[in-house]
Image (cartoon, rainbow, N blue to C red):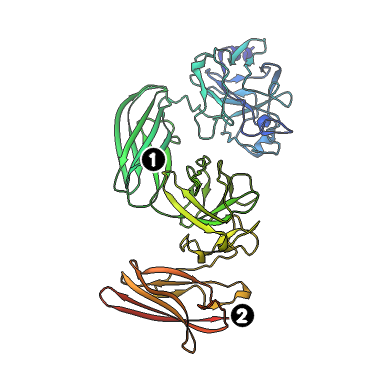
Amino acid sequence: MNLWILAILAVPVINEVMSNPKGQESGSLSPGDRNEFIEIYNSGDDTLDLSGFKIRDNQEEDTLLAFPDEIKNYFPEVVCDTRIPPGGYALILDREYLEQGENYIPYQIPAGTSVLTTGDTDIGNGLSSKDTIYLISPDGTAISTYGLGEGLPLNPPDGVSVERRVINEGDFIGNWAFSRSSTGCTPGYKNSISREIDIVLDSAWVERIGDGEFRIYLDVINGGLNPINNFSVTYDIFGEVERNIDVYIPPDGSLKVDFEVNDVPPGYYRVDLMLRTSGDEDTLNQKKSIDFLWDVTILVINEIMYNAENEWIELYNASDTSISLRGFRVGDMSGAVSNAMEEDFVIQAHDYAVISGDSLAARNSVILPGFPVLNNREETIYLYTPFGFVMDSVHYFSKWGGDNGISLERLSPYLPSNSPSNWASSKCGSTPGERNSVRVDFIRSKDILSLSTKVLAPRRGRDKMVVAYNIPQAPATINLKVYRIDGKLTKTLLYNFYSTTGRGEIIWDGKSEAGKLEEGIYIIVLKAVTRNGRIYKTKKVIAIAL
């Protein structure tokens, strides 16, 4: 009798429905079936026992049972019981939720949540976005529903639940919405659309409006039940700046905010953005970070497979920070330009990405729709930033290297992109997503003259070297020559070269002016004369071993 009275006084409400879990829908133990759930909320003042209650979709009706204790191996503080305390949540899970498979146990269930399941392996007949759902009491009364109102049920995106906005309001279109949680759902937690005050930074992007001048745009949503009268935007580029905005945004209303940032020097920037308003109940949906590049090259074209059934290019991130490829494009000399990269594919610092028009069995590969067809004899490849700048370009010829099924590899990402001496055929066919087989490593030194190696040994795979100069004063006129140990000039690398920066690198393959490669000891001599007449001279010794 007491339980029957409690069931009458306490009101269970269908509060959240996950009918479209992330992942494929079909197949044995597919995540689209295994990870469905229904959340029940006890809106009464007394404990509610769901023993004898049933859940029904459009086709089947299932009795509710306590979930097996096995789930406590993963969530020790949940309650495997049909009783829900006042103001508490019950989560109805598919009986196969703990089975191994894609997207395994994706939900973090909070302590104190009552965890239930059904009498067979599915919730109803397997939930779909077209199902109306009923919570039925032991006497056959539908206590709560989802999907009866006009315009319902909703069709949520993959991995996103449908949440009830106001507990004590009915089953109508205005009281249901897709979850705004960053995880796509809130099982066992207060619904993301049910906060009294909740300002949401929905999206953010940047546009260039001039040299060093940018405008940042924000889409702001009032996700709470009460209006917002003011908020602040904080952003950090060169230091934290806060802008206060007095404006009325009604519940479910939106606002577009924009502001200018000027005098931005060339570089790569990550702008951290945050919204703040008094009393906000969800601080996880107020933040965004956007990346942008301005007149600087930190991604380089590092390898080109121009003569193969599936053509591709490899990019190398030469910086010390990760970079998103979202918005980048690839073009060729015919004027063809690919679609913008829609995927938020991130290249880690000093790592690679392989871009092609079709799937490729390579590490860090990504498909770019509209990837241009590359010419075999001669081609120019352009890498465009989201702002339309050319970050890097390579105008290659077949005589540089590469062949049918053999890629053209870059020796050093830090040397000029259009220098023929910086490219060669891959020694092992190709190296997509990996270190190039012909790569020459070089660590820049403060010395006036630096060499990447002291020995050239072509038969041992060391057939090229980097010769770098770093003149303390610039501009300077530079001569860089190679002599045999007997003093005979064998190669002129630079002759009266005028350098405005005093810094640069050259790749040398050890060959003389006549194209010969001779074993022996050689001396590389540098002489630089600055504009005011100061002279810098130095030399380095190397060996060539055949």
The quarter of the picture where residue 104 lies is top right
> Where is residue 230 drawn, in percent x and y?
31, 29
In front here: 59 or 196? 59
Judged from this view, the residue extending furthest toward the bottom is 486
In front here: 65 or 250? 250
The answer to whether residue 488 is left or right of residue 97 is: left
- The numbered mark, 1 or 2, whose residue comes first in the sequence reads 1
Determine whether 44 is above or below 356 in the image. above
Q: Residue at x 64, y 34 (%)?
A: 23
Determine whether 501 is above or below 95 in the image. below
Q: Which residue is mark 1?
A: 206
Determine whether 21 is above or below 264 in the image. above
> Where is residue 329 drawn, in percent x and y?
49, 45
Q: Residue at x 52, y 47 (%)?
A: 346
Residue 546, numbered circle: 2
Q: Residue at x 39, y 43 (%)?
A: 272
* Residue 92 appearing in the image: yes
Amino acid carrying mark 2 in the image:
Leu
Residue 191, numbered circle: none
Q: Secondary structure at mark 1?
A: strand
Locate the C terminus and report the quarter of the image it occupies.
Answer: bottom right
Q: Residue at x 53, y 78 (%)?
A: 514
In front here: 246 or 217? 217
Amino acid carrying mark 1 in the image:
Val
The answer to whether residue 101 is left or right of residue 493 is: right
> Where is residue 8 drawn, in percent x and y?
59, 11
Q: Secondary structure at mark 2?
A: loop
**How far is disc 1 from disc 2 in space, using C-alphas?**
55 Å
Locate the N terminus and report the quarter of the image it occupies.
Answer: top right
In front here: 119 or 132? 132
